[in-house]
Amino acid sequence: MTELIAKVKALEVDLINREKRFLEEELAVEEPVFVFVNGQHLVTLIASPTMKKELALGHLVAEGLIDSLKEVKKVQVEGSKVKITLTKALDYEHKTSKLITPVVDTASGATSPDFLKVLDGIREKIVRSKTRFALSKVHKMMCDFDKKGGVHRKTRGTHSAAIFRFDGKLVSFTEDVGRHNAVDKAIGCALSVLEDFSETALFSSGRQPAYMVLKAARARIPIVVSIACPLESGVRAAEKAGLTLVHISGRLMKVYTNPERLEFSL
């Protein structure tokens, strides 16, 4: 916990009462994580400085570069570097996306300069899971998700992500300064537990543009639930990829795509 948070001094000003005071505040920390694959630098992720192995592995899955741990021969974490050796050479041309941007910051997270080209490249549904989720379970998962997030409660500067099985069992929970990093870490953590993601749901605190939705789709996660509204590009991506996209706010749930995966009997 401590390495995720740094204490800084700030001057707090009350604009109504015209009062001021100095205080110590806890803020979230970010650092570069350099990912090397087969001896070559692949990408630099600006992220919270924990779970670097899970971040790197989850990123490879979420970007469609590997499908499972079976393709990973060795992983070494040396300070800010994560060195991954695969059982194969990377083939960008025949994967869902290309890693073009060498540095992915905490704000954008996009790894392609033109996500519309990525959307146009989806010729068939990526997610084909027929697993159905009971609304009562989805609601319970969201309640469990909301209870977590210690770093966010302290700093208000991080995002959260979690993966649940369809029966409501929590598989992984992660926090990071970047919403995309949190998702990568959640996927990376779950890799050692799950053989596939066909019976899981991804919960996220971040908004869902196309590139976020496609991370889940590439991992073959059938449903994404967020407490933030999706963007129009996210809805389009979910529809094309065959993924169920849900937004929950308080007592209201909005299902934007593929509602047949949800059992609506209350």
Image (cartoon, rainbow, N blue to C red):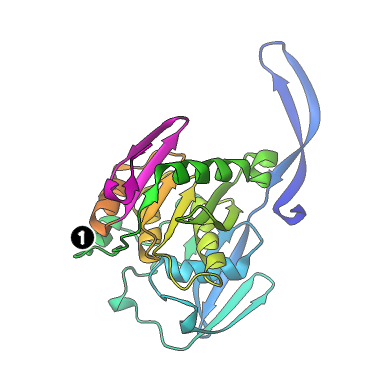
Q: In the rendering, at what x and y percent does residue 223 appear?
A: 38, 53
* Residue in view at x 54 percent, y 73 percent: 35
Q: Give the residue at mark 1.
A: 120
Outermost top residue: 17
Residue 78 visible:
yes
* Residue in view at x 23 percent, y 56 percent: 240
Q: Quadrant of the C terminus?
A: top left
Q: Tell me if residue 90 comes above or below residue 249 in the rendering.
A: below
**Left or right: 263 as drawn, with respect to 101:** left
Q: Tell me if residue 170 comes above or below residue 80 in the rendering.
A: above
Identified by mark 1, the residue type is Asp
Residue 105 visible:
no
Does 262 appear in magenta?
yes
Q: Tell me if residue 91 comes above or below residue 257 in the rendering.
A: below
Q: In the rendering, at what x and y percent does residue 135 appear?
A: 40, 42
Q: Decide which of 207, 33 is in the foreground and name it.
A: 207
Q: Residues within 10 Å of mark 1 (few under 14, many from 20)?
A: few
Q: Decide which of 214, 44 is in the foreground and name it.
A: 214
Outermost front residue: 265
Q: Decide which of 234, 196 is in the foreground and name it.
A: 196
Q: Quadrant of residue 169?
A: bottom right
Q: In the rendering, at what x and y percent does residue 248 appear?
A: 43, 37
* Residue in view at x 42 percent, y 46 percent: 225
Q: In the rendering, at what x and y percent does residue 145 appear?
A: 56, 45
* Residue in view at x 28 percent, y 77 percent: 94
**Left or right: 241 as drawn, with respect to 151:** left
Find numbered disc 1 in the image and state the secondary structure of the residue it sits on: helix
**Left or right: 94 as drawn, with respect to 185:** left
Does 78 appear in magenta?
no
- In magenta, the rendered stretch is 243-266
Q: Tell me if residue 230 comes above or below residue 73 in the rendering.
A: above
